[in-house]
Amino acid sequence: MRMRILHVITGLQSGGAEAMLYKLLSASHGAGFTHAVVALTSGGPYFEKIRDLGVDVQTLDLNMPLVGPGAIFQLRRKIADFDPDIVQGWMYHADLLTSLALMRFLPGKAGTRPPLVWNVRLSEIDPRFIGWSTRLVIRCLATLSHRVPAAIVINAEASRQTHIAAGYTAQKFQLIPNGFDLEKFKPDPAARAALRRELGIAPETRLVGMAARFDPQKDYPAFFAAAEKVIAACGDVAFIACGSGVEAANPAIAPSIARGDIARHLHLLGRRGDMERFYPALDIYVSTAIGEGFANVVGEAMCCAVPCIVTDVGDSRVIVGDSGVVVPPADPAAMARAVIALLDGPAHNRQAMGARARTRMGDFSIAAVARRFEAMWQTILSDKKAWRDRKKAEGTDR
């Protein structure tokens, strides 16, 4: 009999949590598991992608605030309709709304309330980047964490300590890293040549890139400042960046690229739907993030055998290990020095570092990560059955 898992997620826009949910469904749906997805908000590119997998995906079409009596009622009805064995929340608002929906849940066919798993995707709770309403949600979740979820999944060790400090119970965390499709993301000389032709970048030009939405946590000003220093020092080098809002027309970007010679060496591509073509074109991947958990983009670049230079935030140091370079966050001079050192060194050193990176990603294949989720779900259901059997034997089961 297939296990039924209902995933509740805040939205299906382009983000790390959404990407990980999509990859998990790709690797698990139909293999003894039936999945369904409910998004609190409408729209987003992952809605169609998930539906194309054959997974039932629905939306509550909520507006702010996402947590309210009407939203609780709608979600409770969706849960009852699907009758899941386990409900898994993704991100803070979905975790809270699902918790509230299940508190007074009318049992489905199984006769019991399904266990709930939370997913925490951030490693830092920084007031500069997280609004007061989300911080209030986190405080509520910290209180509920001691009695509501059966497990709390984190994708970065740094997240554990951050959330324990915020009041979460220390007893329920399970570390399951992000997973990657090594068949999709791999070295591809044809893709490398094609993207360079598209952008008018010569085959011999060294290319440094970053993929991230335009957001304060990604620190694009540091990326542009480092690029300016590298261009001045190295000459025949180009920089490329993609992500939502990463376009020359963005007025917040214009001042950063108006200085020096950076504009002639810089390509801003906006959102791309072909990241498996983006990474192989690079000689170096950089991440200037000042807040991160387990960065999907760093892992994808490593799968493509691209050496990475990352800031020391979240679990980035753990991800790259000895296959990359780690620099302090918010320090464009340090980032520039690291890029220059790699560019000035022999090409075979970069290639060897990239090869180590891809080998390292073998431990993070999406197939292996999906098995860890599935094992967790099986354990939760086994523990629940054992608890109910014990209560029945004691005559106290309700």
Image: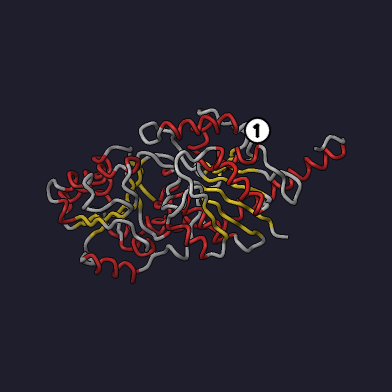
Q: Is residue 6 left or right of residue 192?
A: right
Badge count: 1
The percent position of residue 316, horizontal first and vertical second, equals 42, 44
Q: Is residue 244 left or right of residue 237?
A: right
* Residue depicted at 54% across the width and 28% down the height: 167
Q: Nearer the viewer, residue 115 or 231?
A: 115
- The residue positioned farthest toward the front in the image shown: 70
The percent position of residue 108, horizontal first and vertical second, equals 72, 49
Q: Nearer the viewer, residue 84 or 41?
A: 41
Q: Nearer the viewer, residue 297 or 77?
A: 77
Residue identifier under label 1: 147
Which quadrant is the N terminus positioned in?
bottom right
Crowdedness of circle 1 by 10 Å Cα count: few (<14), some, many (20+)?
Answer: few
The percent position of residue 238, horizontal first and vertical second, equals 21, 57
Disc 1 secondary structure class: loop
Q: Is residue 376 left or right of residue 348?
A: right
* Residue depicted at 52% across the width and 52% down the height: 59
- The residue positioned farthest toward the left in the image shown: 260
* Residue depicted at 61% across the width and 55% down the height: 371
Asked if one can make out residue 364 in the rendered structure from this viewpoint, the answer is no
Asked if one can make out residue 112 in the rendered structure from this viewpoint, the answer is yes
* Residue depicted at 60% across the width and 32% down the height: 144
Q: Amino acid at mark 1?
A: Arg
The percent position of residue 357, horizontal first and vertical second, equals 42, 55
Quadrant in the picture for residue 219: top left
